Image (spheres, rainbow, N blue to C red):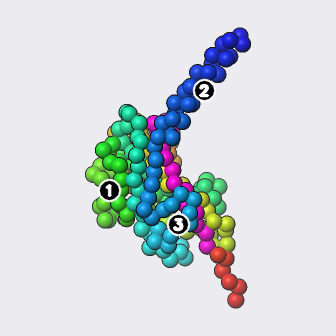
Amino acid sequence: MRRIASTTAALVFVAFGAQAAHAAKMKLTSAELKNGATIKNEQVFNSFTCTGQNISPSLSWTGAPKGTKSFAITVYDPDAPTGSGWWHWVVFNIPASTTSIPKNAGDVKAKLMPEGAIQSRTDFGTDGYGGPCPPRGDKPHHYYFTVYAVDEAKLQFAKDDTAMPELVGYELHFHTLAKATLLGRYGRPAEKKK
């Protein structure tokens, strides 16, 4: 019995080790966003009392594992006072030949995404990039910019730009081979009392 448990533990360790090795190989970088740094006003939302430029940062990635058939990108804020966080950007079906997207690719009208990529619904209720805009006075929120290496060329259930972020996230949960993340932080001071 002890031998079986040891063998099972070893197999689990090897499986997780292989997965971690893939994750360690994949790397995400941006000219506009440094890991752990404050997000610049250029990337901040321009509505809901926020006055940024709402320009998505450029993203570049390396180290995708064999078997990658497409990529996806999300930006998620777990600190939003909603009980379920806030999805700021959801992109999927990015062709496997892609290794970067330019600055402002999150503007759907600019048409800077690779052909076939779909930018779907965010928690702002629109498709495309929506930058940080936390409530005034909150501690700085954490914004996770993540690129996923996906084992499908096209997601099965998320069909178009009306797909909800939860549906995309559900599919990515089962079809991600590896991923890489950049963390950005952003907060706004409390309003001054008059």
The residue at which mark 2 appears reads as: 13
Q: Nearer the viewer, residue 125 or 104?
A: 104
What's the amino acid at mark 1?
Answer: Met
What's the amino acid at mark 2?
Answer: Phe
- Labelled pair 3, 2 in contact (Cβ < 8 Å): no
- Labelled pair 2, 1 in contact (Cβ < 8 Å): no
> Can you give x and y, in whole percent of width and height, for residue 130 in the image?
47, 64
The residue at which mark 1 appears reads as: 113
What's the amino acid at mark 3?
Answer: Ile
Binning the other alpha carbons within 10 Å of mark 3 as few (below 14), some (14 to 19) or many (20 upward) gives: many
The residue at which mark 3 appears reads as: 39
Secondary structure character of the magenta stretch overall:
strand
Depth check, mark 2 against mark 1: the one in front is: 2
**How far is the residue under mark 3 from the one under mark 2?**
37 Å
Which quarter of the picture shows residue 77? bottom right
Q: Residue furthest left?
A: 115
Disc on the earlier residue, 2 or 1: 2
**How far is the residue under mark 2 from the one under mark 1?**
38 Å
The quarter of the image holding the C terminus is bottom right
185 magenta-colored = yes
> Can you give x and y, in whole percent of width and height, for residue 92 in the image?
39, 48
Q: Nearer the viewer, residue 17 or 126?
A: 17
Mark 2 secondary-structure assignment: helix
- Where does the magenta region start and end? 173-188
Using the image, determine if residue 178 lies above or below residue 14. below
